Image (spheres, rainbow, N blue to C red):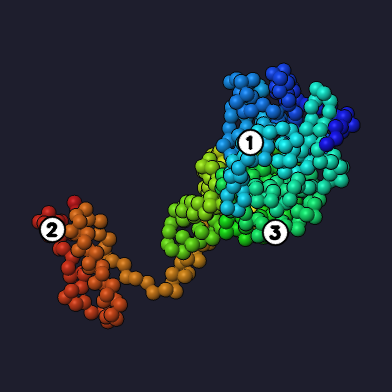
Amino acid sequence: MQTLRASKCGLSTAQLPSYILDVIDALTKAGYEAYIVGGGVRDLMLGLNPKDFDAVTNATPSQIKEVFGRRCRIIGRRFELAHVYSGRELVEVATFRAPPKKAVTSAQGMILRDNNWGTIEQDFVRRDFSINAMYYQPRKGIVLDFCNAADDIKHKTLRLLGDPQTRFEEDPVRMLRTLRFAAKLNFSIAPEILDIFNPEAAYLLRDVSPHRLYDESQKLFTMGHLNRVMPMLIEFGIWQQLFADIAPKITPFIERAAKNTDQRISIGKTINPAFFYAVLLWEQFLERCHFYQHKGVVAAEARAQAGLDVLKRQSTRTVIPRFAETFIREVWEMQTRLLNPKPQQIEALSGHARFRAGFDFLLLREKSGDTTTQGMGEWWDAYQIMSSDQKERVIGQYNRQRSKSRRSKSHEDDVVLARQPQELEPLVQEPESRSRRQRKAKQEVQTQVQRSVASGSTDGTIGHDHPILKRKRVQRDLTQVIFGPTQ
């Protein structure tokens, strides 16, 4: 172990937000050791802006609860830790871990219980990557480095502590973290990790809870380097373990959506991680829609059932929460409404709660080469920046074009029907009877007519069983009828 001066590592208390100092000071005042650890220290040393800060201490979760009272909430069973609230900010506080006295693992070696408290020396060994094992005490101005992590940060190398095979078996999610850190920090992966990182090792992810895999997938989508990590998921066999039935191929649509997501994050815009799931599952959704429509299901029902099927299948790998499922299905449904909107509903549609997400999805499809959008992506893009008068003119033009297209389609349908044998229509259109017995009799008559036509009796003769002879004659009182000119 080496003790480094914080100033030489580029660290100072001026870089730290008040909430993490509040947590460190409260634990220290109560007589416990407390350090900032993990990604926060690493990012500060790399000159990056940390997203959050984690703390570690020799106090047990129950003792942490005593220090912070109602501001603290203990969570987790497999890995118990404390969430401490400081104002609106949340700090995750963990207790020093020691090697388990009795290993509680799955058949594949994954640790199922990890709540054995120990010392800081034992805790460092339990951490996954060397770059995340630096302990920073801001009030003392020191950094404890047990594994030459400072050199790994300097040389931009991602290295696991201990045997990589064992560490992956203990927690397969470390494979996802390896790719995430390599893509986010642009670090190279150490050779000893590459030697064992293959599709067979990736299969260990099947033992991880689908809920936890969903959380990890969200971290991949929101880290700001999604376009860089997607090829790595395919290369190391992770793709097949995260996504059900999605071919391990980065389509132009997926690539453009990934770049767009990274750009939004880089300029500080918010994103919904469920949006990228909608992109990934789009092809499967279309295939399922075609399947149901081929079976004769109405288009709206086919889309609804296809959405349920695709999301249910994906939940076997990553359980998507109900609110995210609803968002994804609404984005898919908006595609139909945006492609062929009714003129009188265009203005209301532009104010729909899911319009922006649906429009972004449509525009990404169009820009990635999808010709089925019929240019409506650019149409909606231009529509949003128009004045009220311009919108009225554009809607009028759209309505005329839509009517023209419908007339053209109607004419084509008439031409097709003219080439097909036409059915004889009745000379007199009788009103629909309200009596069930009469409706049934009429249906039987129509069936007999169809049978006679099918049998080839088209010589023009009328038999005794012809429908016209079975019509009920209406008796009229001719005494009131006036023949000839009226006065």
Spot occupied by residue 123 in the image (x, y as percentages of width and height): 72, 36
Question: Around disc 1, counting alpha carbons within 10 Å, would you say few (fewer than 14), some (14 to 19), or many (20 or more)?
Answer: some
Q: Which residue is mark 3?
A: 198
| Picture residue at 74% right of the left edge, 38% below the top | 124
Q: Which residue is mark 1?
A: 116
Q: Which secondary structure, mark 3?
A: loop
Spot occupied by residue 399 in the image (x, y as percentages of width and height): 55, 49
Question: Around disc 2, counting alpha carbons within 10 Å, would you say few (fewer than 14), some (14 to 19), or many (20 or more)?
Answer: few
Looking at the image, residue 25 lies above or below residue 98 = above
- Amino acid type at image mark 1: Asn
| Picture residue at 62% right of the left edge, 60% below the top | 247
Question: Around disc 3, counting alpha carbons within 10 Å, would you say few (fewer than 14), some (14 to 19), or many (20 or more)?
Answer: some
**Upstream in the sequence, badge 3 or badge 2?**
3
Q: Nearer the viewer, mark 3 or mark 2?
A: 3
Spot occupied by residue 311 in the image (x, y as percentages of width and height): 52, 51
Q: Which mark is residue 166?
A: none
Q: 403 or 53: which is nearer to us?
A: 53
Mark yes or no: residue 112 visible. Answer: yes
**Upstream in the sequence, badge 3 or badge 1?**
1
Spatial separation of the CA atoms under disc 1 and disc 2? 102 Å
Q: Which secondary structure, mark 1?
A: loop
